[in-house]
Amino acid sequence: MKKNNIIVLGSFILAVILGIFGQDFAYLLNGIFPESYPIYNLSVLTLISIFLF
């Protein structure tokens, strides 16, 4: 039971972090992979955040 709570809490925290700092992560990924567009990175990060909720 405790392991399940840790997994749920961890995914919730990760979803919140991705939701709040998603734009910063998108620009960071654009710096690492310059051929990708930040809007696509932001869309993927937003969808991951929504699915984690």
Image (cartoon, rainbow, N blue to C red):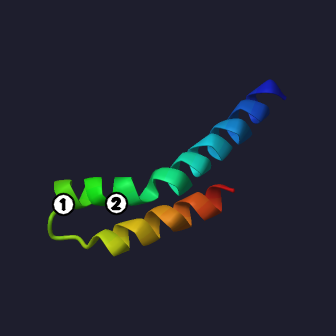
| CB under 8 Å between discs 2 and 1 | no
Up/down of 52 relative to 17, above or below: below
Up/down of 13 relative to 53, above or below: above
Secondary structure beneath dot 1 equals loop
Please tell me which residue is depicted at 57% across the width and 58% down the height of the picture. 49
Q: Position of residue 50 (x, y in %)?
A: 62, 63
Looking at the rendering, which quadrant does residue 37 occupy? bottom left
Q: Residue furthest right?
A: 1
Q: Residue furthest top?
A: 2
Residue 26 — which label?
2
Looking at the rendering, which quadrant does residue 47 occupy? bottom right
| Mark 1, residue position | 33
In the image: residue 49, left or right of residue 30: right
Distance CA(mark 2)–CA(mark 1): 10 Å
Q: Nearer the viewer, residue 12 or 27?
A: 27
The three-letter amino acid code for the residue at tag 1 is Phe
Please tell me which residue is depicted at 77% across the width and 35% down the height of the picture. 4
Question: Count the marks: how many?
Answer: 2
The three-letter amino acid code for the residue at tag 2 is Ala
Q: Position of residue 42 (x, y in %)?
A: 41, 67
